[in-house]
Structures are given as structure tokens and as C-alpha cells.
Amino acid sequence: MWQKLKQWAKQLKADIQALALAVQDARVPWYAKVMAGITVAYALSPIDLIPDFIPILGYLDDLLLLPIGIWLSIKLIPPVLFQEFKEQVALTGKQKLPQSKTAAILIILLWLVILCWAGGLAWHWYQNR
């Protein structure tokens, strides 16, 4: 069981690297680039959408959101191209992808938008009580 989890994690890392290549390739459709870009940015962000210190929910984003984003990104990329990117990753070896400060800023901005939206709903509810 533990070996299967380790293999799955290695596959996810390789897929993230292949998606990073897809974002830079002109042959990939724009909508696939957007989804792959969001997925790669989230994977490289040092800040999670749901912080890990929140019990159970903190790890659910890593166990659910990231694999779903990878799966959806792969489905949007033409299979021939994605296979090419996977082969390129296999040939060049798995390289360590840097953490992205831009992705961290986007996650922080997303949290601020969510907080403002929730605050607006709370204010609206308070005013109409």
C-alpha cells in the first residue's frame, strides 16, 4: 500500500512537470493552457487554498483538488502532445520545480476575495435582519 502511494506521488510530480511544459507549448489550446497553468501554479504555491493546519480539510485540498486539476488538465490537452511532454520529462529527468511567489500571491488574493464576499454576505444579512 505504501509503495503504491509513493508511486502515485511520483506520477503526480511527473504530470505536473509535463503540464508545466504544456503551458509553454504553442500547440496546446488556450483553455488547456489556462487550466494547466492554474494547476501548476497551485502545485508550486507555497500557500495552500486550505491551510494544512486545519484538521482534515487542510489535507483534502492536496488529496483532491490537485489530482482533479491534473486530471482535468490532461483531458484538455491533446493526448499526442501530453504523451510527448511526458516523454520529454522522462528523458530530461525529473527536475525540481521552484515554488512560485506569483502563485502564492494569487492564492492570497483568492482568499481576500472570498473573505470580502463572505463579509458582504454577512453585512447584507445583518442589515436585513
Image: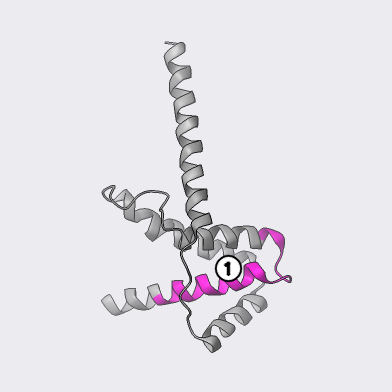
Q: Residue at x 45, y 75 (%)?
A: 96
Residue 1 can be seen, yes or no: no
Residue 12 in magenta? Answer: yes
> Callout 1 environment at 10 Å: few (<14), some (14 to 19), or many (20+)?
many
Above or below, comparing residue 114 to residue 15 in the picture: above
Q: Amino acid at mark 1?
A: Ile
Residue 100 can be seen, yes or no: yes
Q: Residue at x 49, y 24 (%)?
A: 120
Which residue, as the protein is rendered here, is positioned at the far bottom? 91
Query: Is 8 situated left or right of 72 in this image?
Result: left
Q: Residue at x 59, y 61 (%)?
A: 37
Looking at the rendering, which quadrant does residue 24 occupy?
A: bottom right
Looking at the rendering, which quadrant does residue 75 occupy?
A: bottom right
Report the magenta stretch's main SS: helix
Residue 126 in magenta? Answer: no
What SS does tag 1 mark?
helix
User: Total label count?
Assistant: 1
Query: Is 125 situated left or right of 22 in this image?
Result: left
Residue 43 in percent (x, y) is at 46, 62
In which quadrant of the rendered image does the C terminus lie? top left
Q: Residue at x 43, y 22 (%)?
A: 122
In which quadrant of the rendered image does the N terminus lie? bottom left
Q: Which residue is mark 1?
A: 74
Above or below, comparing residue 99 to residue 107 in the picture: below
Residue 49 in percent (x, y) is at 42, 49
Magenta region: 10-31
